[in-house]
Every structure is written in C-alpha cells, then in structure tokens.
C-alpha cells in the first residue's frame, strides 16, 4: 500500500485555534480553514497537518481529548470536517491529523469510568497506583510532569494516584493493556477509512513505562524521563499499531520523538522496521539552549553539525526539516540574529538552508510571511506551561524573573498568536476579540501586504516548493557540508547520479566573503535559485550579501 509520497512532499502545519475565525467568536475554526484553501494551495504544499481538532475541554488546547471520534464544538462539526477534507483532496493536498495517544482528557468516558472504583472495567485503561507513606498520601514515585510539579494526582474516590506526564487533566493511558492498544488502532482506522492520509503522533515515545515505575534519577528540570522515554516495549507497541492500522493504508506517520537520537534512529524509522515513517528530532533546536530551557547565543557550526549527522542516515530513513511548530518560538531572530532591514532575505535564507536538505519539510502557519515572536505580559500568556511554571518558581529567589526571560524567548505562545491576514482590526483573523493576543506588528507583517510586495516571502516559498518538486538530487541525493567550520556560511552539495547542486546561504546581516573549497572553485555553475534579484556570480572568491541564498547547478569541473 505504501507509495512513500511524503519523500517528495512539503507539509503545512495549521494550528486551527489561531488560523482563521469564520463565525466571529474569536476562535479559529474549520470553516475558517476552508475559506483559505486556495491560499494554502498557492503555497505549493502537498499536505496539511492539523493540530488536534477532536472534542476536548481544552486544558491544553486540544491535546486533552474527550472524544476521539468527534469534532471540538468551537471548531465546527463533522460535516465541516468532511467539507474541509474534500476541499483539500480536490486540490491535490493530503490531510494529516494529530494523534494524541499517550494520554486522554480526564473528561474522556474511559477515565470517568476508570476513577469510579478499583474494579471498574476501565480501571486498567490508565496507570493507577497506591501512594507511599503510612497513609498513602505521598506520590508513588518521584516523576515530574513536563509542565512542572509531580506527575501524580491523588484521587479521593478510590484513595489512589493516577499518572499524568503532562497536565493533571491529561491522565496517561496504560499501553500495557491490550484493550487500550486496540482502541488506538481502531481510532486510527476510523479516520483513515474516512480518507485521512496519516498522523503526527504526539509524544509517542512516552507510551511504554518501565515495569514497576521506579524512581527517576535526580534532575534539575525533570525526573523520571529515563524510565519511560522509548521504554522497554515501545518498539513492540509501534510495530503492532503499524500492523493493525497504518500499514493497511498509503499513510504517513511522523512521531514527536523525544529519546530517538541518531544512535537509535535507524531502528525506529528505517523502512525495513515497519514502525514510524519519520520523527521530529529536536536536537538542532537545542543548540541555542542550556538544559533545554535557558536561551543562549545561536551557533551556526553546532547547528550544521547536528543536521549533517542526521543527513548521514541511509535513504531508507526519512528526515524531517523544520524550524517552527506550535511548540517552538518563531525562527526569525532565533537563527538569524538581528535581521533589521532584511526580513525578506532572512526568512527566505532560512527556507533555502532547510528545505534543500534530504527530508520532508514542514512549514508552520505564518512562517511563509515571516511572522515573529510577540511580547507578552504575564496575564497575556495563554499556555498552561507558563502558568504552572510561574506558580512553581515563585518560591525561588529571582525565579519569576528568570522564567520571564526564558519565556520571552522560548514560550510556545509565540507560535500561537493569530494568523496575520491583513492590516484591519484583529489582523483579519476574527471580527471579535481573538482568544489570545494578536502580535502588534500585524499592520506591516500580514498576508495581504506580503502578497503585494515585490519581495514576497510567500511567493518565494511557493517558488522554492516548485523547485523541490520531483528534483531527484534533493529527494534522494547525497549530502555533503562543504564548510562545516564556517561560522557565517551554510553551504552544502546535493548529488544524485550526474546532477550536482550547490546550496550557499549567508546567515549574517552583513556582507560576508566566502572562498569556495578547491574542489568547487574551478567548476562551471548555473544559478538556479536566489533570494536576491540578479543572484550571485559564481566565482572562487564570493562576496555574499546579507542573508543571501543561492542554489547552483554544477555543470563541470576542471
């Protein structure tokens, strides 16, 4: 059944709550997305990934699901979903949904039943344990939630604790129970029988916990991760899910994959292992952070080193190429430094640098017009992570100040501000006050303005996507970083058969000299793509303008 169409595809991620509001309630919805299908088609993408649209009480913006087979009331109806689905497919665009299978909402029927009694048929759908201490009022182990605090919640009804690796309203499912695994496979089949083309699998590497749930090693940030990240039965569970569901369709599955590193990636995503098709590795997004949390200066050499290591995987292992998503801050500024006066060049340079490597590119809504981080006051943040962390650090000297600094650079809310469609009220996102703050720069960063510009980031993305399409050197070609130690330039070769491409990108907001390595200096080259009008002249000693990106086809070598 597998055509592996995703190898020559670009995926556009939509965060429905913040994309477009059709009914004036301040919340994005499915009909809002439907109204923008031609905009999405014009970008030249092949698939759309929707962040969760299932029924949910929204403790964590839809990642707490109360019904996997229905649509969130705020987003619309199943009829709206089918219209959206048909609209995408009629335009040749596939649909990828978000599969949240490590946990549910505490308002899901399964959990409502599970907490009623210790012998309820659904009790074993979740992870319940007796507490420690004489009265059982201490958590069963020292694991901490990804949102801060203990990963356990005491329930008065049965005097036991349930595990929640995220919010207390997101109890973890017990994948040891074969009934749970069958439920998840049935959910996948329900949507794919409808015609859905695949899934992005949320925190999928957390589904297998070590037997006995032992205490975690001491850690300043989180405790317990080594006891459940890519746990002992992870491969067994994913192979089973693939066999019972995904492999029966021409599907695409990508996992949010903490714990999957270069050392074990082959065993997780190679075509021969019949598990996930690919994963999101976040290693390249950690080169500007201490302890995965505290921001520090971006290092291009470290960034290239990480990407180069993943490019070394065999062609039977598909990479993902991304800089932004709903959990990451915006890329402009983060990877470019101060781009003042050169926003178009900086945004398009990042696109070229990432998208011409081997892998499936993901573009996050707003990235295609160069949306940026937003300044928030404490009461403007909407993310549950901000609220819980601030509640914890208030007891630590300077804790709130440090947390504010970190969130100002890394908060998930930076990516969740409403899509900026035009310069009218609320950025054209909604006729009502939006559910969260609109970035004040919407008057000069918006879709209408970008499309009217000669230097249109959107149009460059569309051109880049067309250039990628069917290009064997990009899809399957070998990759070689030609200047790994250069702190200013990202340059690499892609080669497949007789076709050779040279990609050169300046990451600085200033002109930079670049001496081509000797093996390329005498080559004849033809410019195929550039983000500067007229493009750069190919010569042994090049002078690249601020954020200049150029792609050359190498014709011969002297």
Image (spheres, rainbow, N blue to C red):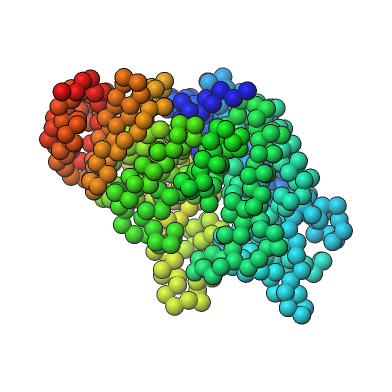
- 211, 475: nearer the viewer: 211
Q: Where residue 452 sits in the image (x, y, percent)?
A: 32, 29
* Location of residue 135 with respect to 209 vertically, above or below: below
Q: Residue at x 40, y 33 (%)?
A: 358
- 253, 99: nearer the viewer: 253
In the image: residue 489, left or right of residue 381 = left
Q: Residue at x 59, y 66 (%)?
A: 216
* Location of residue 79 with respect to 222 vertically, above or below: above
In the image: residue 384, left or right of residue 479 = right
* Location of residue 469 with respect to 108 vertically, above or below: above
Q: Where residue 378 sits in the image (x, y, percent)?
A: 47, 63
Counting the numbered discs, the total is 0
In the image: residue 39, left or right of residue 184 = left
In the image: residue 426, left or right of residue 156 = left
Q: Where residue 285 sits in the image (x, y, percent)?
A: 41, 50
Residue 256 in view here:
yes
- 29, 179: nearer the viewer: 179
Q: Which residue is drawn at 59% across and 36% down?
A: 273
Q: Quadrant of the C terminus?
A: top left
Furthest toward the bottom, the residue is 134
Q: Residue at x 44, y 59 (%)?
A: 292
């Amino acid at each position: 059944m597998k055509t592996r169409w995703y190898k020559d595809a670009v995926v556009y991620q939509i965060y429905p709550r913040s994309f477009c509001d059709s009914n004036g309630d301040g919340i994005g919805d499915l009909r809002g997305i439907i109204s923008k299908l031609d905009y999405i088609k014009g970008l030249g993408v092949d698939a759309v990934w929707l962040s969760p649209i299932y029924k949910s009480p929204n403790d964590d913006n839809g990642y707490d699901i109360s019904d996997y087979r229905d649509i969130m009331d705020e987003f619309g109806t199943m009829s709206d979903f089918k219209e959206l689905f048909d609209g995408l497919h009629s335009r040749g665009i596939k649909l990828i949904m978000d599969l949240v299978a490590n946990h549910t909402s505490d308002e899901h029927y399964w959990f409502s039943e599970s907490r009623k009694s210790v012998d309820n048929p659904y009790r074993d759908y979740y992870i319940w344990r007796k507490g420690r201490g004489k009265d059982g009022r201490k958590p069963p182990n020292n694991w901490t939630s990804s949102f801060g605090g203990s990963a356990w919640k005491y329930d008065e009804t049965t005097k036991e604790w349930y595990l929640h690796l995220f919010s207390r309203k997101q109890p973890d499912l017990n994948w040891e129970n074969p009934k749970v695994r069958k439920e998840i496979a049935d959910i996948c089949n329900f949507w794919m029988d409808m015609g859905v083309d695949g899934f992005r699998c949320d925190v999928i590497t957390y589904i297998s916990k070590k037997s006995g749930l032992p205490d975690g090693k001491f850690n300043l940030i989180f405790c317990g991760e080594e006891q459940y990240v890519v746990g002992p039965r992870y491969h067994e569970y994913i192979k089973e899910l693939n066999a019972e569901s995904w492999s029966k369709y021409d599907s695409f599955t990508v996992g949010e994959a903490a714990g999957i590193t270069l050392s074990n990636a082959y065993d997780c995503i190679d075509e021969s292992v019949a598990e996930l098709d690919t994963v999101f590795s976040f290693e390249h997004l950690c080169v500007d952070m201490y302890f995965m949390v505290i921001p520090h200066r971006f290092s291009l050499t470290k960034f290239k080193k990480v990407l180069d290591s993943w490019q070394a995987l065999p062609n039977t292992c598909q990479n993902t190429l991304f800089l932004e998503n709903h959990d990451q801050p915006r890329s402009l500024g983060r990877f470019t430094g101060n781009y003042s006066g050169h926003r178009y060049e900086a945004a398009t340079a990042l696109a070229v640098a990432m998208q011409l490597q081997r892998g499936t590119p993901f573009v996050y809504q707003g990235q295609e017009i160069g949306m940026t981080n937003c300044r928030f006051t404490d009461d403007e943040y909407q993310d549950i992570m901000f609220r819980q962390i601030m509640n914890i650090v208030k007891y630590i000297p300077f804790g709130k100040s440090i947390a504010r600094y970190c969130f100002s650079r890394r908060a998930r809310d930076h990516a969740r501000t409403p899509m900026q469609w035009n310069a009218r009220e609320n950025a054209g996102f909604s006729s009502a006050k939006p559910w969260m703050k609109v970035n004040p720069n919407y008057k000069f960063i918006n879709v209408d303005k970008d499309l009217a510009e000669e230097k249109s980031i959107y149009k460059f993305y569309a051109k880049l996507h067309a250039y990628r399409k069917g290009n064997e050197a990009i899809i399957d070609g070998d990759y070689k970083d030609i200047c790994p130690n250069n702190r200013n330039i990202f340059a690499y070769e892609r080669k497949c058969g007789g076709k050779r491409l040279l990609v050169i990108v300046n990451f600085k907001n200033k002109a930079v000299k670049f001496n081509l390595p000797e093996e390329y200096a005498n080559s004849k080259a033809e410019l195929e793509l550039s983000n500067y009008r007229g493009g750069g002249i190919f010569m042994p000693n090049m002078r690249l303008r601020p954020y200049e990106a150029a792609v050359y086809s190498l014709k011969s070598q002297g």
